[in-house]
Amino acid sequence: MGIRPCYTALELEKALLTRWVIFNPHRMFPGNTKAAFRWWCKWVYDVCVRGPGKKRVLIDEVWQWQTNQQIPPELALIAQTGREENIELVLATQLPHRINAAIIGQSTEVVCFRTDERLALETIADLGVAPEKVQGLPLGSYVAYNRLSRACLAGRVF
């Protein structure tokens, strides 16, 4: 997509004008990614409060930043109260079984690509997705499940 990552708070603020913000924390927080993640979550929430309209926040492999017993308060703020500020939280992971139950409990949509990993399949089954549908997917295909309406959609990315 050609989007340059931001390394400072000032660069993040400037990037808001493009409506796309990617944060690389390694200059602001060398060797301390956990502190960087907490700072970034707080920054995101504060920015979302300032602006109108829907905002989408993507966190890749969120399990790295939380445990089954604890969620950083800054992440909990986005996950549990973000809807009030029109924040749509999008999480991507290959290890859904490592995501805290409080975060999973807030999810309304589940999108799955092919996996054969037993614990991942058990977790998505608990979320309402038929594991056999996921195991048999061709590469590049997905199954999307709406946990509220129970509607299921299948498609192909490539």
Image (cartoon, rainbow, N blue to C red):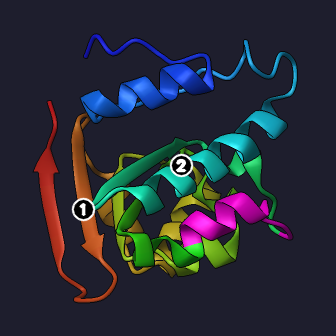
Residue 123 can be seen in this image: yes
Please name the amino acid that badge 1 sits on.
Gly
The residue to which callout 1 is attached is: 53
Badge 1 element = loop
Badge 2 element = helix
Q: Position of residue 78 (x, y in %)?
A: 56, 64
- Residue lying at the far bottom of the rendered structure: 149
Q: Which residues are magenta?
A: 69-79
The residue to which callout 2 is attached is: 44
User: Looking at the image, is 137 positioned above or below residue 52?
Assistant: above
Q: Position of residue 125 (x, y in %)?
A: 47, 75
Please name the amino acid that badge 2 sits on.
Val
Q: Position of residue 110 (x, y in %)?
A: 37, 66
Residue at 47% of width from left, 16% of height from top? 5
- Mark 1, Cα crowd under 10 Å, few <14 / some 14-19 / many 20+, is few
Residue 147 or residue 129, whichever sits in front: 147
Residue at 60% of width from left, 42% of height from top? 61
Magenta highlight on residue 36: no
